[in-house]
Image (cartoon, helix red, strand yellow):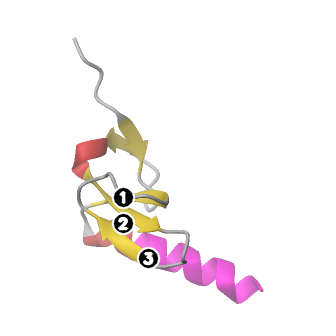
Amino acid sequence: MKKIPQRTCIGCNSKKDKKDLIRVVKNKDGQISIDLTGKKDGRGIYLCKSEECLELLRWKLMKVYTRI
């Protein structure tokens, strides 16, 4: 039986199947895009397909950037 890859949502920090998450990628030119195929080159983060996780991520990023 083949193993299903697991990834962690950066918003809620829960582990889910890779296919159930959205991948956001930053390529070497610094451009950020959504990777629906999971095969684009670049560094990626995974996020649940929920509005709550998007809000959690936004809140975390604001918290980090207001400390600087």
Identify the residue position indicated by label 2 in the image. 53
Callout 2 amino acid: Cys
Is 25 part of what is drawn in magenta? Answer: no
Where's residue 56, x and y in %? 44, 71
Residue for badge 1: 40
Marks 2 and 1, how far apart at CA: 22 Å
Name the residue nearer the viewer: 29 or 64: 29
Between tags 2 and 3, which lies in front? 3
Determine the CA span between mark 2 and mark 3. 18 Å
28 or 7: nearer the viewer? 28
Amino acid type, residue under disc 3 in the picture: Ile
Q: Earlier in the sequence, mark 2 or mark 1?
A: 1
The image quadrant of residue 35 is: bottom left
Q: Residue 32's mark? A: 3
Estimate the spatial distance between the alpha carbons at disc 1 and disc 3, rounded to whole Å.
11 Å
User: Residue at horizontal 28%, vertical 28%?
Assistant: 4
Quarter occupied by residue 48: bottom left
Write down the region rendered in magenta.
Answer: 55-68
Helix, strand or loop: magenta stretch: helix
For the residue carrying disc 2, how many other residues have a C-alpha within 10 Å: few (<14), some (14-19), or many (20+)?
some
Mark 3: which secondary structure? strand
Check the picture and name the quadrant holding the C terminus.
bottom right
